[in-house]
Structures are given as structure tokens and as C-alpha cells.
Image (cartoon, grey):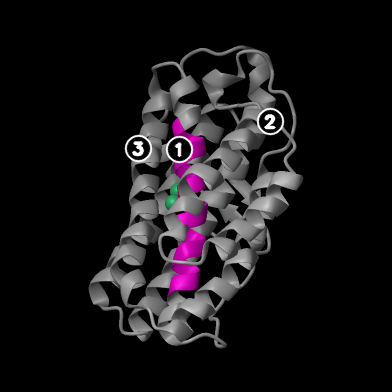
Amino acid sequence: MSAAEAGVLDLRDEARAVELELDTYPDDLRGPAIGTWCGRMLNEYGSAGVFEALAAQLEETGFGEELARECLGFASEERRHGVLCGAVVEALGGSARAQTRAQAPFPAHPDAPPRAAVLRNVIHVCCMSETVAVSLIGAERLEMPEGPLRELLTGIYADEIGHARFGWRLLDAVGPSLTEAERNAVEAYLPVAFAHLEHHELLHLPLRQPPPDGDQLGLCAGSDARELFYDTLSSVIRPGLARFFKPDRVGEAHQVDEAHRVV
Ligand SMILES: [Fe+2]
Ligand SMILES: [Fe+2]
């Protein structure tokens, strides 16, 4: 049976095979930590499908087999991240088995020229979501004491850096040669991508205070994480995109999210 049949993701066998043992932690962290790492398990494993779809789109639009293969490698890494998060759940005494959430279909963007359609997805997935993941996981890792959990997170962090860089590299390679029609098509999508990113991140970063010492199991304050999210938008993602796209297209969403800033 596959790991994700019938709306249930069951990674118990793979997760137990990791044989993760955690350092001692306060018992009251167990419940919140199981919930958090189970959510991460679903998110990480679900990201594999996104990279598989991106690989197919890259190949179909003539970006070449090598880039498509790289994306398929990212899909395997995301599956592995799911297993590693499941290993944390199991090490905490929980079960690495959970109901999967409905996922939005991967957008083909038939209204855009083919290269712009790919770039829309690369920007959304790699330059936005994966770049935010690098910030959030990097900060969480810094706050975590040395030990097996930090080591596990370091491995995930290194992979996420690769996923984000893939997008920025591709944008650097393709950005300067975009036709006006391609550039317009990407720019038209940027506010949609920013809005989607913000909605998704805020949903996963609830404004709750973690229990004291939550850092040691990766339970961070939602308000700090949201602040870091907005800092990443304004100091990394927007300037990176403004090198190729009109600042007013990159900046429009800035005013929207500044107005909704909750920190
Ligand atoms: Fe990941
Ligand atoms: Fe990733």
C-alpha cells in the first residue's frame, strides 16, 4: 500500500526506521510538539507532489531534462523530510499517521506564454515559499539547543536552501531574456502569488505563545515567526524580484501585507 492512500498519510514504518532518540524534554511539551511535527510531516510530504508537477512542466516547456531531474530530486527530499518529521512524532510517543489535507491543484497557467507559466510557478514555489522556509527553519534551528533534533533540522534546512536557490538561479538565467509579453504575464501574477503566500503562511503561523522551553522541540512564538516572514518578504523576496519586474508590481502587495501586519 502506498504511503498516502485513501486520504491518510501513514509513515509509521519509515519513521520508526529512523530510530530517532530525543534528548530529555519537559513532559508538558509532548502534546503541542506532536501536533506541530505531525503538521510538518503532512506539509513536507505534500511538497513532493508540487516538485513532481514542476518537473513535468519544466520538461514539457523545453527547459531541459537536467532541471526537471533536479526537481524530481527535490521531490524525494521533501518525502524524506516528511519521514524525518514523522520520526520526531514517533520519538515523542505519537503516531506518524495522519489525515491528509486537500491540496490545491498545481496551476498550469494556460493564459501565459510557456516560459512565463513556468516562471510563475518557480517564483511562487522556490523564490517565495522555499525562501520563507529557509528563514523560518534557520531561525528555529538557531534557537534549538545542540542535539539530535537540531541535527535533523540542519539536514532539512540544507535541502530547503537548495530548493530556494534553484528558483533564484533559474530566474537569474531566464529573467534577462524575457520578452515583453512574458514579463507582463509574470508581473500580472505576482500580486496573486504574494497574496497566496501570505494567506498560507499566516494560516501555519498561529499567534499562540509556545510553552516555556518550547524552543528545544521547535515550538516557536507565532508572532516572532510572522515578523520574520514579513522581514523575509521585504528584505529578500521583493528586492530579488524587483531586479527583473516593475517595482510597482513587486511593491503593490507590500502595502497590503504591511496593512495587515499583526506583529
Ligand atoms: Fe522540505
Ligand atoms: Fe523544500
Mark 2 CB lies closer than 8 A to ligand 1: no
Q: For mark 3, what is the residue?
A: 155
- Residue 223, numbered label: 2
Q: Look at the picture and state if 215 lies above or below 90.
A: above
Choose mark 3 or mark 1, whichever is in front: 3
Choose mark 3 or mark 2, whichever is in front: 2
Q: For mark 1, what is the residue?
A: 16
Choose mark 1 or mark 2, whichever is in front: 2
Apparent side of residue 166 relative to residue 117 in the rendered image (left or right): left
Instruction: Tell me if residue 17 is in the magenta stretch.
Output: no
Instruction: Tell me if residue 124 is in the magenta stretch.
Output: yes
> How many C-alpha atoms fall within 10 Å of the one at disc 1: few (<14), some, or many (≥20)?
some
- Residue 76, numbered label: none
Between the residue at mark 3 and the residue at mark 2, the CA separation in whole angstroms equals 25 Å
What span is in magenta? 119-138
Q: Main secondary structure of the magenta part?
A: helix
